[in-house]
Image: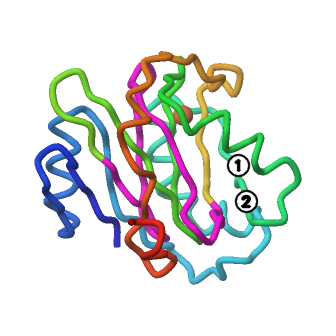
Amino acid sequence: MAILTIPKENRTIHEPQAIADYLAGIGVDYEIWEAATKVAADAPAEEILAAYSTEIDKLKEAGGYVTADVIDVNPQTQGLAEMLAKFNREHWHDDDEVRFIIEGRGLFHIHPHNGPVVAIEVVAGDLIRVPGGFLHWFNLCADRRIRAIRLFKDPAGWAPHYSESGVDANYQPLCFGPSHIPALAQ
Ligand SMILES: [Fe+2]
């Protein structure tokens, strides 16, 4: 289950509907998806996409997305540090950032124009949609593992634009799930 924190308010939200409601208030969509057919988290990408095709097609229609793929990141991924360094400081994209988590976890910080920065730790079963133009940044958790479906209107629109605000430096990229390492919190 996802965990939403609002660091400035010292607030943590665990209940999925309350997370969805809070995020809706800042313009971010959050849903929990269930596969129509059972699919292993390590199944080939085509099987993953087929198992969630109903939800993917619905979202494509609603959001104007034209392509979907599966991204796989683990500690052995080549160029992982460089890849993560592209997204771990405040940026926005022209396209929406749409992720449905298959396995692993990740931490999005979102910096809305109408409220404090929120951190959402997403895990398997979570769909998050950060609209184009929204300031955010992303970190992996200690296990450095995430497998996710991505949807795009145009893959080229997903290049990051950096705000260079330095706001991200005020927030610790700490996850609370099983891979949380307490020593890092000190
Ligand atoms: Fe991003």
- Element under label 2? strand
Q: Amino acid at mark 1?
A: Asp
Residue at 49 percent across and 75 percent down: it is 181
Q: Is residue 185 left or right of residue 93?
A: left
Task: Name the residue that disc number 1 marks.
Answer: 69
Q: Is residue 62 above or below residue 183?
A: above
Residue 120: % across, % down: 35, 54
Task: Find the distance from the CA under tag 1 to the CA under tag 2.
Answer: 13 Å
| Crowd tier of the residue under label 1, counting other residues whose Cα lies within 10 Å: few below 14, some 14–19, many 20 or above | some
- Towards the viewer: 90 or 169: 169
Location of residue 185 (image quadrant)? bottom left
Location of residue 136 (image quadrant)? top left
Q: Is residue 94 above or below residue 52?
A: above
Q: Overall secondary structure of the magenta stretch?
A: strand
* Residue at mark 1: C-beta within 8 A of ligand 1: no
Quarter occupied by the C terminus: bottom left
Task: Name the residue that disc number 2 marks.
Answer: 73
Residue at 31 percent across and 43 percent down: it is 29
Q: Amino acid at mark 2?
A: Val
Residue at 48 percent across and 16 percent down: it is 163
Outermost residue on the right side: it is 78
Do callouts 1 and 2 mark residues in contact (Cβ within 8 Å)?
no
Quarter occupied by the N terminus: bottom left
Location of residue 83 (image quadrant)? top right
Q: In the rendered structure, does residue 171 fall within the stretch colored magenta?
A: no
Q: Is residue 89 above or below residue 180?
A: above
- Towards the viewer: 100 or 79: 79
- Stretch of the chain drawn in magenta: 119-147
**Where is ligand 1, by quadrant?**
top right
Q: Is residue 90 above or below residue 45?
A: above
